[in-house]
Image (cartoon, helix red, strand yellow):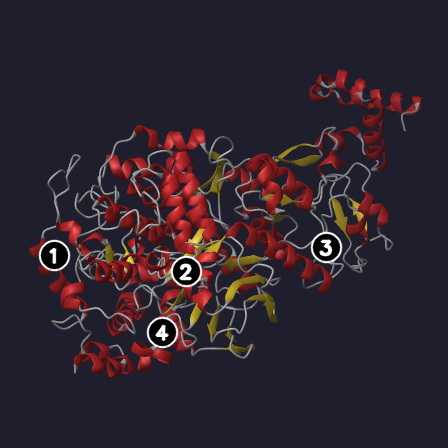
Amino acid sequence: MLGYAGKFLEVDLSNSSFKNTTFPKEWLMDYMGGRALAAKILSERLIHKWEKVDPLGPENLLFFMTGPFQGYFPGGRTCVTGKSPQSNGMVGSTVGGEFAVELRCAGYDGIIVSGKAEKPVYLFIKDSDVELRDAISVWGKDCKQTEALLNRECRKLLAERYPRVGVWKQPAKLYIGPAGERSVRPSAVIAKWTHAAGYGGYGAVMGSKNLKAVAVKGTGPLPEVADLEKVRRMIDDVCKGCYSNVMWRRYGTGGGGYSFGADTSSEPVRNWQEEWHNQRSYGVDQFENKVWVKPAWSDFGCPTNCLKISCIRAGKYKGAISDNPDYELQAFLGPNLGLFTPEENVYLSSLIEDLGMCGIQGGSVLGFAAELFQRGVLTKKDLAGLELKWGDVDAFAVLAKRIAYREGIGDVLAEGTHRAAIKLGKMKGKNLLPYAITGKGISIGAHGIRSGRDFSREIGYACSVQGGDHTSMTDLPIDGWGSEIWTIFNDSAVMCIFTSFSLKPNFRYEFYNALTGQTLTRKGWLQGGGIKTLEIQRALLLLGGPDLTWNPNADDDNPERFYEPLPTGPCKGQAADRASVQEKVKQYYSQAGWDQNGIPTSETLTKLKLEYVDESLKRLRS
Amino acid sequence: MGSFANLISMFWHIAGLQDIVCFSKLSRLIGTVLETSFQKEGARKLGWNSEQENNAIWISREFSKCSGCRKCEIACSLQKENKIWPEASRVRVFMLVPGAEFPHLCTQCEDYPCVEACPFNALGVNKDTSAVVVDAEKCTGCGKCIDACPGKVPHIHPQTKKVLICDLCGGDPKCAKVCQEGGWNCLKVVKRGDHEFKLYSRTPEETSRNLATKMYGEKAEEFM
């Protein structure tokens, strides 16, 4: 099919075997790629035994997916997914970088990894030459070291094997750090030091499979498309739209650390006890003038360059390097921990990224622990001498390392905020879940709902099939602008939304059609791949297991904290309205074709020709 | 080099150009007679008349402004291959250290060592643009030009197995155009003038180390 490389690479780590696979054209037409296609493949293969599949066991499948947009639509991203060790459902997580472009140039639309390697390995792909290599030289290394070592080793291999073709560029790489190696659930799949597929915990899945990294060099062209001239014109339109967005290009999300506190009052402050701050020390100008050493950093084809690079060149935190940090890390490794300076934020972001942890999930579990310390639930003794006070960046750094290496209390916190709340609650004889600001096991992104001023909505997290994932929130009506159906499109096409703000609603379908020669419309996606993926992901989320399952009646809800009135700021006193949320959740059920218990109905699934999903959901209905 | 005849030729040349830019640099030129006459040697080798020399362009490069977006690679491969094909692009963005991205492309050395090194006379110089041109019929992909290039810039096309060298798009380089459109200003078309072009031809390793050290200080050595 036009717009596709034409095959997928399947890797079985248990017996070091590879094969090329194709999927029916109807699957590609319906599900496109990325998140949606992975949901289809994953459910076809594992839904019949989903509850028994340990996300951190060899039977789980790990997907590295591209989509037809990759390489053409400005902004490089790769979708990483599988059964999530955080939600026990499936989370389509995407990460920036050139990996998808290299993979498509190597001739693959995606990689599906199964099994578990006997010892640490990394996957090295040069076009159709695929091999598993001993990862002894990189296992245990942090992410910055891993990037350097893999570059050196892979470029040496390329030069030896393919001599006299000139100097080889770096291959694109995805890798894990020490946290992923130890299957720490809040760990991420990392690219380019600082880019992370964080939601879902797929760094832990890679670690559980003894897969340290995937490196790929593709020397072919991008797959042929249906109408190149039109695609080129449309790329220009995307770029022009971005170029006119001057301030967005200049700051990216780097202004968020201040503005989501001061203006929208929706930023996690001290583990969401507050959502407002107006600390001038945390202004974007402070980041720009104090720590940004590169004012524009882009991934493949990107006109926005929302990323910047920060480096601390003097003082206590000298040598710390991160990106902006972007808003999420500014929030979670900043005000969320009572930190309000760029230097502390960059230092902690740099550390978290080196360890291969997700800044959101990692920052959330650090904030959770600090609140327990504030409340006397966790003691200095529990923390092996650590006083985990708000604003003490050094204490948080120590704890982050203990989590990544699963030392002492870190071993419990390494299970992620939700599971740690359950475990510690049992140890302490207390209900600690009210302090875990999560949705379906996934710590909620840094966009609170209480102020009503942010883009997050009342049921955005409660009804998302990806739980607390702020990039996959949903809203009523199901065909409205805020619906999750459209985020599924973005993660499946696979496209970056930070280059797409200026586009008309139909632009992405026209772009898809110009690439593939199909005739997809917005309505077609809504009634086809979009809704089908939503139903599949919902089914997998509800089947859950093996360690946790979700009860829609209790868990399709906001964290308890969002019902507590905001204590400070311009929206003081505001909180989510429980009755309104419950009412909207029920409406959402009905619009999504789910029954009163939130389970997709047989009628819905049959209409969508998802009988195999319906068959498995019978286990829930009985 | 540096001979009296060269010196005379140089001044004749400059006077003949009537170019204010060149005049403004007169004092500097006199101070670096050796180097400059060496360049003029290169120019004469091209058989340039003053008009041609005046029209000749160069792509100036300011690596610390590179965002790593690879739009130059995309534009180049679309122009030359009618495809997006990073490995077949004449300009290649290296990222041996994240953040230290830069476009690696031919700098049109004054003495064209690649052209000299080709055993098959497959390389030549376009007199209007100063660009190295490849005669694909004659190129065997032997790689001698790569060895001769101080920056190891040329590389072999992954499919045709012929060498790839920037030809300045015949005087309208698409890489610089997209870089300018985006306002990055890393690649910019300027008059060729009398710069020490060969200085800019450095290996990706050397440039990466320079840029990374400039950004990250001593920490950079860990990333190489």
Which is more N-terminal, label 2 or label 4? 4
Name the chain letter of the residue that bears numbered label 2.
A
Residue B177 left/right relative to A441: right
* Residue at (45% x, 46% y) in the render: A351
* Residue at (73% x, 44% y) in the render: B151
Mark whose residue sits in front, 1 or 4: 4
Asked if the residues shown at circle 4 and circle 3 are in contact, with their CB atoms under 8 angstroms apart, the answer is: no
User: Can you see residue A230?
Assistant: no
- Residue A266 position, x and y percent, is 23, 43
* Mark 2 residue element: loop
* Residue at (30% x, 74% y) in the render: A546
Q: Could you say which is closer to the camera, residue A162 or residue A387?
A: A387
Mark whose residue sits in front, 4 or 2: 4
Q: Which residue bears the numbered disc 2?
A: A494
Determine if marks 2 and 1 fall on one subunit. yes
Few, some or many C-alpha atoms within 10 Å of disc 1 (few <14, some 14-19, many ≥20)? some
* Mark 1 residue element: helix
Cα–Cα gap, marks 2 and 1: 31 Å
| Residue type of the residue flagged with mark 1 | Val
Residue A103 - label:
none
Which is more N-terminal, label 1 or label 2? 2
Relative height, residue B215 to residue B6 (above, below): below
Which is more N-terminal, label 3 or label 1? 3
**Residue farthest to the left?**
A579
- Quadrant the C terminus of chain A occupies: bottom left
Which is more N-terminal, label 4 or label 1? 4
Name the chain letter of the residue that bears numbered label 4.
A
Residue A166 - label:
3
Q: Which residue bears the numbered disc 4?
A: A54
Which is more N-terminal, label 3 or label 4? 4
| Residue type of the residue flagged with mark 3 | Gly
